[in-house]
């Protein structure tokens, strides 16, 4: 049985929450680090522990390189966006994020060093993520498609027009499988 699926609550330290928000807001405001893909998208990995149906988020690692531009990923990602995404102002070729295998490997090593497991990923949605009225606080059909069979938690960080941030968690990006987050 997948332990993530049986988790019914997530605890997240306020410092970790603030690190996620800072990463997303910085990228949305076009303040890029030299090593980052220069785009208004933020993506990161989430490390933690599970104990008695409780996930405890201990660490996040913001990722820098959007690997979706690598030739090996480009066509598959474009096809997924065409088939599953909501229309947006951005061109298909400029949407979505794929984690760099090199960055994932480094993150896994760091999680291992602190006896943590990779429990999921986070990414942001904002008012310009797509057109239409579908709530940007929730995973999109594309999110669910990309998270299928991952056995991970997808943390959606919504940044409003006023800059307020909110994070919600969904098992494999499924709308019907939201996990309540408590901040401590």
Image (spheres, rainbow, N blue to C red):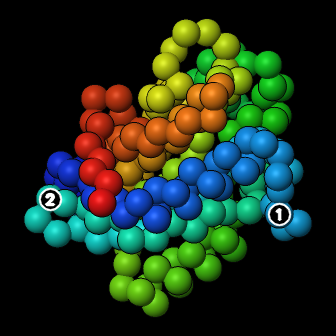
Q: Which residue is mark 1?
A: 33
Q: Residue furthest bottom?
A: 113
Q: Picture quarter containing residue 14?
A: bottom left
Residue 147 at x, y = what percent? 47, 44
Q: Which residue is mark 2?
A: 53
Distance from disc 2 to disc 1, alpha carbons, whole Å, reads 37 Å
Q: Nearer the viewer, residue 83 or 63?
A: 63
Residue 158 as seen in the image, left or right of residue 90: left
Q: Residues within 10 Å of mark 2 (few under 14, many from 20)?
A: some
Residue 59 at x, y = what percent? 46, 70
131 relative to 18, above or below: above
Q: Nearer the viewer, residue 124 or 22?
A: 22
Q: Are marks 2 and 1 in contact (CB under 8 Å)?
A: no
177 relative to 34, above or below: above
Residue appearing at x 52%, y 83% in the figure: 110
Where, quadrant-wise, is the C terminus in this rendering?
A: bottom left
Q: Secondary structure at mark 1?
A: loop
Q: Secondary structure at mark 2?
A: loop
Residue appearing at x 74%, y 35% in the figure: 95
Residue 55 as seen in the image, left or right of residue 6: right
Residue 84 at x, y = what percent? 58, 24
Q: Residues within 10 Å of mark 1 (few under 14, many from 20)?
A: few
Residue 11 at x, y = what percent? 28, 58
Q: Is residue 29 visible?
A: yes
């Amino acid at each position: 049985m997948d332990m993530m699926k049986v988790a019914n609550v997530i605890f997240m330290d306020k410092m970790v929450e603030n690190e996620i928000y800072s990463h997303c807001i910085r990228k949305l405001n076009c303040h890029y680090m030299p090593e980052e893909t220069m785009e208004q998208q933020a993506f990161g990995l989430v490390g933690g522990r599970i104990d008695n149906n409780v996930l405890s988020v201990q660490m996040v690692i913001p990722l820098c390189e959007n690997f979706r531009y690598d030739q090996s990923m480009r066509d598959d990602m474009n096809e997924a966006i065409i088939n599953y995404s909501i229309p947006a102002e951005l061109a298909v070729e400029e949407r979505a994020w794929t984690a760099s295998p090199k960055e994932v490997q480094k993150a896994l090593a760091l999680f291992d060093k602190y006896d943590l497991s990779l429990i999921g990923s986070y990414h942001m949605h904002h008012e310009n993520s797509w057109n239409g009225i579908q709530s940007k606080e929730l995973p999109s059909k594309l999110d669910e498609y990309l998270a299928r069979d991952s056995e991970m938690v997808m943390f959606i960080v919504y940044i409003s027009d006023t800059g307020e941030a909110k994070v919600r968690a969904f098992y494999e990006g499924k709308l019907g499988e939201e996990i309540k987050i408590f901040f401590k």
